Image: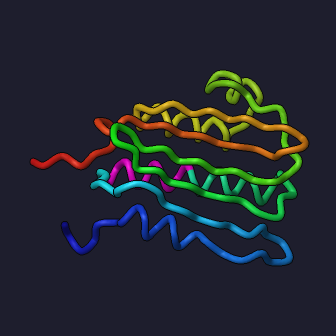
Amino acid sequence: DKPEDVDLVVSLTAMSRGPSVDAPAIDVTVAGEPFNVSREAIYLLLGVTQEALRNVERHSRATSACVKLTFAGNCLILEIDDNGVGFDPPQDEQGAAYRGALGLLGLYERATLLGGTLYIASSQTTGTSVRLRVPLSSVSRSTS
């Protein structure tokens, strides 16, 4: 590893914070046995996380958000959940583009670049959940 390498777990954990007057609390957890993730994948995963959290802050009126990164045997799962007011999410990239929802479009585009699948579920009573599932083969660092 080069010293300038970005560590996914360290970068995500740094996003944890307590609640403030204008921002929800953010809790970050990591599950499973971490594996090496390519630098490109790290930047895309951090981009998904930052955009989802920006949406939480701007639109959800949530008091808390949870970020969970799971290193599963054959994939990586990134989940961002909030307890906000929810909305009617587009179901795919085309729906986000049609609505002009550029932040959501960016989430779908990053998922595509990662070779993963993005799901957004939302309700007025339970808030919003963003789930990104990426196959290990798409994100693992090559050993070349």
Q: Is residue 63 magenta?
A: no
Going 68% across and 67% down the picture, which residue do you hit?
26
> Which residues make up the magenta segment?
39-48
Using the image, determine if residue 27 lies above or below residue 62: below
Does residue 86 appear left or right of residue 79 in this picture?
Answer: right
Q: Report x, y in % for residue 84.
A: 84, 52
Image quadrant occupied by the N terminus: bottom left
Going 36% across and 66% down the picture, which residue do you hit?
7
Q: Report x, y in % for residue 124.
A: 90, 41
Does residue 13 appear left or right of residue 84 in this picture?
Answer: left
Q: Report x, y in % for residue 80.
A: 64, 51
Q: Report x, y in % for residue 27.
A: 64, 66
Main secondary structure found in the magenta portion: helix
Using the image, determine if residue 121 lies above or below residue 94: below
Going 37% across and 48% down the picture, which residue do you hit?
41
Going 68% across and 28% down the picture, which residue do you hit?
97
Q: How is the image coloured?
A: rainbow
| Total number of numbered discs in the rendering | 0
Q: Is residue 46 magenta?
A: yes
Does residue 11 appear left or right of residue 58 in this picture?
Answer: left
Q: Quadrant of residue 2?
A: bottom left
Using the image, determine if residue 46 lies above or below residue 137: below
Front residue of this view, candidates 40 and 13: 13
